[in-house]
Amino acid sequence: MPRTIPAAEHLDTIASRFAAGFPEGPATWRTVGREAEYPIVREDGTAVELAALWPLLAELSAERGLPLLPKREGRLVVALEGQRFTYFSEVGRGTIEVLTGPHDDLWQIADDHELAVEILLDALSVQGWTLLGYGTQPLSPPTPALMTHKSRYGVLLQVLGDPWLWFTLTASDQIHASVRRHEVAPLASICNLLAPVTVALCANSPIYAGSKSGFCCARESHMGQIHARDHRHGMPAGPFQDIREMIGHLARQPFIMERRQQGGVWSYQPGALSFGTWLEHHGADPEATGRQPVYDAFEFHEHYIWNSARPRSNHGTIELRAACQQPWTERGLASDGHRRADHMAASALGVAMICAGADLATLLQRRLGDTAWHQMRHWHQQVIVLGLDAPEPVPGLLGDVLDRCEAGLAARGRGEERLLRPLRHRLSTRQSPAQRALDHFDSGGIDALIDGLAIR
């Protein structure tokens, strides 16, 4: 009989393997990658059926000399993969994700991203559909009918209930930056602590289901309802001292879904009270009962924990998740003649937080002291509702954070700090994208909102 392996020993092994995804040694040049989701709507503002776009996107990309290969789950096309960008379908059937990178800098990300969006706009013009620089579907409500037909999503709905359906609407703007092994815990912790900064400056989802939600960032509000007591989404309960402590925290989270194999076919089933509980019962030899190997099961478990900053071992990066999708352009901002200075703002902020992580940690300790997590958590709840109208924990904190972020990007020597200019403008006017979206809606309802946020 196989030796029964204690759960704690499994967690040590998981932590070692997780850490191995991040290279050792001093910090070097940070590569970056972007995952940007966009809602697509019909003329009346309702969500489209994304599957209808795949053949046209493949055709138009091929005409540009950029062939895309379809990726399938069963018969369902879930992505078109290319060398410079990938189009991907997520939970919402009317939302498309554009993947770019990894690249050496944000300008290269912007070049590939804008090319992908240009082709996407050509395809949408054929259909008469509109792409929005917005953080959620504006009119279609969250229903199972809007959920992409992937079998695991049905299990997630079964286990998590209605809060899971918010993923059918959401459109976030996520950025990755590479990190070294010794940086994982401290940088993930400081970036999670700074989540309210991202929400304050980048909230852009105040209206959904055709009405005002009462939040500047309805994304963070509604998705934060998922296992809220466990801090499964958004800010975690506190910082992590090292990777092992972080793995232990993740293992205490409910194990909401596991993959099982029978007759050579994988299926998805509700999991256990926690991943640690699953380890205690099935960790000795899970393959013998058709279960995933332990580390594969952990990766699957960890994928469905959505903290604002989460280390991604399979990429060697930290992923920043708190930003809504941004407006493509912002009137009144000349920047340097490039629209990219607007739609790249959230990406630039995320990379800057990682580059300036040590300085930002010192700043927050100096300005907020030992109660930093308590104060920032309270502020997080306020900015979700009020955006930039929420009072800062201490006066001038947002400006101080942007100073460090600009310095962090400037140190890379590629002028990426220019991409933060829209955030300075938002801070000086105390108007986030959410507040401008509300202005559009107040002036003419959904039609005005869509017109104001359409990417043209």
Image (cartoon, rainbow, N blue to C red):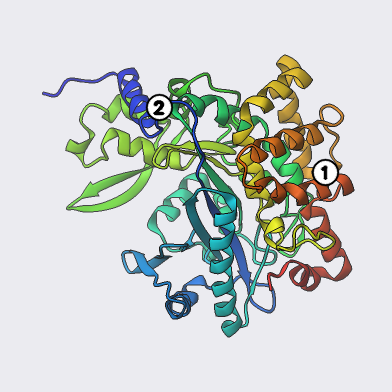
Q: Is residue 91 visible?
A: no
First in sequence: mark 1 or mark 2?
2
In x, y percent, where is residue 224? 63, 41
- For disc 1, the neighbor class at 10 Å (few under 14, some 14 to 19, many from 20) is many
In x, y percent, where is residue 44? 69, 77
The C terminus, quarter of image: bottom right
Q: Which residue lies furthest to the left in this view?
A: 1
Q: Can residue 57 be seen in this view?
A: yes
* 183 to 347, vertically: above or below: above
For image coordinates 60% across by 26% down, the residue present is 237
* 125 to 227, vertically: above or below: below
Instruction: From the viewer's side, name the closer residue of 363 and 29.
Output: 29
- CA–CA distance in space, label 1 to label 2: 39 Å
Would you name the residue on which mark 1 appears? Answer: 388
Labelled disc at residue 126: none
In x, y percent, where is residue 255? 42, 36
Under circle 1, the secondary element is: helix
Amino acid at the residue labelled 2: Glu
Q: In which quarter of the image is residue 83?
A: bottom left
In x, y percent, where is residue 180? 46, 30
Amino acid at the residue labelled 1: Leu
- For disc 2, the neighbor class at 10 Å (few under 14, some 14 to 19, many from 20) is few
The N terminus, quarter of image: top left
Tell me how many marks there are.
Answer: 2
Labelled disc at residue 24: 2
Q: Quadrant of residue 278?
A: top left
